[in-house]
Each structure stands twice: as C-alpha cells, then as structure tokens.
C-alpha cells in the first residue's frame, strides 16, 4: 500500500481553464487526475445536444485533452477519473478509445465506464410504482412538470468508479457522479478502505469537496487578501495529498501561481454547504464540524480529524425542466443625470409594454452602478454618477410576449432619454428557461453498470 496518494484537480466545471489539467500532469508528480465537468444545468444542455446529434451529449473538450495528456499519463501511470460522459458516456468513451488507438495505445490502455445514472426513460415506471420524486424544496410531485422534463440523472457515488479502477481502468468515465466521488474513488482503490468505515469515507469526501472546484481552493475567487495573491495568470490547481489514515494535505505544484492557505481552504469548505453536521453523499454523511485544519508550510494545509456517519438509503436526483422563456436587454446612460435617465427609460419601456397588452410572469429592472449588486445604495445614488446601465429582464410562458419585449429596447435609443450607448450587441435573444428539480429516490431501484474494455 502506498503511504501517500496525490489526486490532482484538473477541471472545476465544463469550460474551466483548458491548460489546467495539462499543467497538473506536466508540472509535478501526481497519481490521479480528477476532472469535474458537470453542473446541474449542464445535463440539460447535453441532453439537448444529444437530441440533435446522437453522437453528442458529453464534454467534447475531454477528447482533445486526452490526446494531449494520455502519452504522459501512460508513461507515468497516472489514472484519470472524469464525469465527462454527461448523458452519452459510451459515446465519450468510444471517442477516447479512438484517440488512444491513434496514439498507438491499442491494447495498452483500459477504459472504464459507469452508466445507470440517466433515468429519463424510467420516470414513468417510477411514478407508476409510487415513487413520486417530490421536489425537495417545494414538496410538489414530479407529475406537475412531467411533460416539460428535459433530463433526469441520479447522483452516483464512488463505488462504481472503484470497481472500474479495481479492474485496471486507467481512464474512468462517468455520467452524473458526485463531484466528491471522483476523488474518493481513487483513495478507496489505493488504500482499500471499507465501505462502512464512515470516518474515512467522510475524509475522502471532504478531500473531494475541497478540490472539486479547481482553483477556487488555491487562490481563485478568494475574498481574503485577494490583492496579494501572486501570479494568478499562472494559477496552480489544488492537489489532495492523502494518507491511509484519512488525513490529507491540500497543496499545489511548486512554481505555480495562486495560494493554498487556511483562508483559501476554509472558503471552499463552506461552498454549497447546508447543515454542517450533515453533508450527505451516496457514500456517507460527513460532519464538517469535526474538520481540523493546520498550516503545514508554504502552500500546504493539513486536514484531519474528520468524522462521518452511515450513508442514507436514498440517492439524489437532478431533474431539469422547461419553465418558460426569458430575455434580458441593456442600455447604458451617461453623465449627466445618468441614474435619472435610466429610471425614466424604464418607466417609458414599462408603459409601452403595458399599452401593447403584454403580460409577464416577472419583469425585473436593475440599475447597474446604482442598485444591482448590493441593493439600493444608502440614500440616493450620487447625481454625478458617470454612467448607469439599465438592465431589464422579463420572464413568461408565452414566447411571443418575450419576443415582442426584445423589439422594444432599441427604440429607446431615439425615443427615450438622451446620452445612451451600449447596444452594440444587438437585439436581446429569447432564451428557454431551464429550471432545477431536486428529488430523492430509493437506492434499491438504481443499479449502476460498470464496464471496462481495452482501447
């Protein structure tokens, strides 16, 4: 058994720095590269892509990345866990298999895939059996939006990935697995942790939570002393340096920018956290109040003392559905009287929409520079504000109403207050609103499938 395993984060979301995973492989020693591509809305985007093209539906960026880093990974024995499969795990794996063959690795690289998270085709079956998939926030039954659902995926945990790794997979591709499982699985595989060793399950889960958002744990998006974080253009992504006892150190490669210290790790720990006593995943319930942190040197934070409890009998389901249409239009008004001009333009626009008989579920006006970020400023905004951006958004189930709204912004340029600019982007676009529906489903009705095959 190795005494230290280094799991490096290479992507925090689909669209993160393209060079980050390359640098994680090339600029220092690592054992595993963890790539997290999926957010809740990402699944619906991929589902739409697959509907247009059966060969799409996964993170296309992952394939050229493999072409760049696979030779080095094979040479150094670096293994990869990635949820790049989206809603087309097999299609993603086949594309990677083709890349491996082009690189001369036929028969030399094993690819593992985990499926079973996509339950889109089983929703009616579940509902008919009494599994209502009620919204965790509102309590509504899924039947109320059944005809508008775009995607439905269960969050799978670490163990299917562990099975693929145990069968020799160098690259493991999943669909909607938990972000934390991408890191926990390598630690279980290397250290042989038991499924009911809840403290170690919790430790690996929290290690995954800290590095799942990429550079957000190593200086990016950091509130504390952000002005003095060095060389953010060359920011290093975080690495979890884990030990068999469940303790680990968060660090980054030497010579990279950014910063790993107590504040950077603490900020990431509270990200997306509800009850700190109950961070619930498919693999365990982690207690964040037991986490202990200590400075372990330059760009090194030791994490230890973590406690966990038995996993629940449910899995979370991420469901997306169509919830109408929206459009957002902007105009910028300049000094003098910028705020007054923007307010007058908003009143004119609303009067015209009302005269047209258009009705919206919501009209939201913001005056960027006066009240958009922190609400109304104390007192009135200064009369000499150099510029204020009028930003108006509408939402409706009636697409035609939203489309008509988009045609009412530009006329304000010549039929409203003076000194306006900022319309070079053209008429606002109508966008479909994708809403999020969180639900729970019994673990017993979900069976992940694991396959491992050679390139």
Image (cartoon, rainbow, N blue to C red):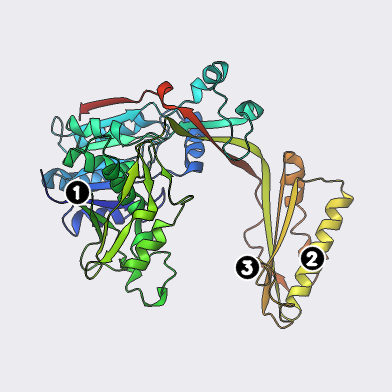
The answer to whether 348 appears left or right of 436 in the picture is right
The residue lying at 12 percent from left, 47 percent from top is: 76
Instruction: Name the residue nearer the viewer: 42 or 373.
Output: 373
List the residue tagged with mark 3: 374
Quarter of the image containing the N terminus?
top left
Q: Measured from the top left, where is residue 217 in percent x and y? A: 35, 60
Q: Is residue 45 above or below residue 16?
A: above
Q: Residue furthest bottom?
A: 384
List the residue tagged with mark 2: 345
List the residue tagged with mark 1: 245
Structural distance between the alpha carbons of marks 3 and 1? 45 Å
The answer to whether 317 appears left or right of 109 in the picture is right
**Is residue 63 visible in this depiction of the protein?**
no
Instruction: Name the residue nearer the viewer: 429 or 59.
Output: 59
The residue lying at 71 percent from left, 80 percent from top is: 335
User: Which of the marked residues, 1 or 2, is nearer the chain's N terminus?
Assistant: 1
Do labels 3 and 1 touch, CB within 8 Å? Answer: no
């Amino acid at each position: 058994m190795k005494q230290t395993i280094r799991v490096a984060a290479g992507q925090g979301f689909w669209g993160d720095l393209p060079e980050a995973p390359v640098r994680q492989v090339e600029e220092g020693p690592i054992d595993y590269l963890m790539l997290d591509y999926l957010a809740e809305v990402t699944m619906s985007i991929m589902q739409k892509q697959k509907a247009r093209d059966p060969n799409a539906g996964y993170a296309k960026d992952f394939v050229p990345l493999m072409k760049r880093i696979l030779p080095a990974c094979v040479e150094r024995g670096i293994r990869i866990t990635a949820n790049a499969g989206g809603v087309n795990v097999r299609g993603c794996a086949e594309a990677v298999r083709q890349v491996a063959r082009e690189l001369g690795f036929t028969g030399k690289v094993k690819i593992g895939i985990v499926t079973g998270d996509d339950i889109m085709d089983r929703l009616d079956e579940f509902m008919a059996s009494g599994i209502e998939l009620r919204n965790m926030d509102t309590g509504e039954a899924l039947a109320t939006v059944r005809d508008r659902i775009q995607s439905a995926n269960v969050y799978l945990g670490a163990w299917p990935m562990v099975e693929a790794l145990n069968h020799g997979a160098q690259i493991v591709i999943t669909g909607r697995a938990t972000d934390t499982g991408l890191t926990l699985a390598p630690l279980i595989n290397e250290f042989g942790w038991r499924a009911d060793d809840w403290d170690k399950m919790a430790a690996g889960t929290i290690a995954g939570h800290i590095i799942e958002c990429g550079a957000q744990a190593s200086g990016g998006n950091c509130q504390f002393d952000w002005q003095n974080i060095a060389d953010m253009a060359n920011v290093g992504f975080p690495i979890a340096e884990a030990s068999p006892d469940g303790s680990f150190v968060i660090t980054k490669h030497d010579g990279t920018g950014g910063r790993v210290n107590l504040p950077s790790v603490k900020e990431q720990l509270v990200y997306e956290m509800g009850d700190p006593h109950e961070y619930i995943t498919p693999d365990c319930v982690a207690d964040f109040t037991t986490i202990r942190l200590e400075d372990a040197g330059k760009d090194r934070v030791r994490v230890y003392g973590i406690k966990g409890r038995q996993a629940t009998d449910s899995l979370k389901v991420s469901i997306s559905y169509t919830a109408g249409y929206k459009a957002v239009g902007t105009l910028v008004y300049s000094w003098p009287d910028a705020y007054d001009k923007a307010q007058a333009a908003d009143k004119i626009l609303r009067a015209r929409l009302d005269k047209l008989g258009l009705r919206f579920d919501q009209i939201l006006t913001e005056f960027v520079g006066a009240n958009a970020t922190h609400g109304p400023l104390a007192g009135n905004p200064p009369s000499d504000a150099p510029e204020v951006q009028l930003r108006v958004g509408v939402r409706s189930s009636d697409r035609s109403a939203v489309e008509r709204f988009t045609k009412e912004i530009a006329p304000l340029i010549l039929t409203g207050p003076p000194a306006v600019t900022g319309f070079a982007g053209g008429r606002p676009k109508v966008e479909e609103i994708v809403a999020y529906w969180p639900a729970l489903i019994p673990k017993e009705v979900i069976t992940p499938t694991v396959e491992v095959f050679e390139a």
